[in-house]
Image (cartoon, rainbow, N blue to C red):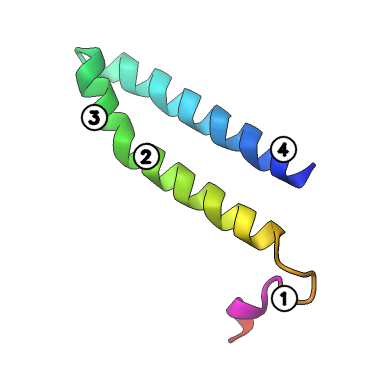
Amino acid sequence: LELLALGAGLVLTVRTAWRAALETAATRRRAAGALLPWGVLAVALWLAGVWIVFQPMQMRGTMAMG
């Protein structure tokens, strides 16, 4: 269920960013260029979330404790 929630969040994020880019850009090509950095950031955050989900419960949050 956690992976499903992460995936849904990624899809909704990219969809929202795409719609915002289409509203502000003159062409679809420029909209795709505007979406690219935000899409990369969204995928990076999704990958971090997936990595955290696959960590054992004892390991979650230990990197922040240093």
Q: What's the distance in space between the residues labelled 4 and 3, CA to CA?
A: 28 Å
* 58, above or below 66, in the image: above
Q: What's the distance in space between the residues labelled 3 and 1, CA to CA?
A: 38 Å
**Tag 1: amino acid:** Met
Question: Residue 51 is drawn in which quadrant?
Answer: bottom right
Pointer 1 residue? 59
Q: What segment is highlighted magenta in the picture?
A: 60-64
Check if mark 2's residue and mark 1's residue have beta carbons within 8 Å: no
Residue 34 appears left or right of 19: left
**Tag 3: amino acid:** Gly
Residue 17 appears left or right of 31: right
Circle nearer the N terminus (4, 3): 4
Query: In which quadrant of the rendered image does the C terminus lie?
Result: bottom right
Circle nearer the N terminus (2, 1): 2
Pointer 4 residue? 4
Pointer 2 residue? 38
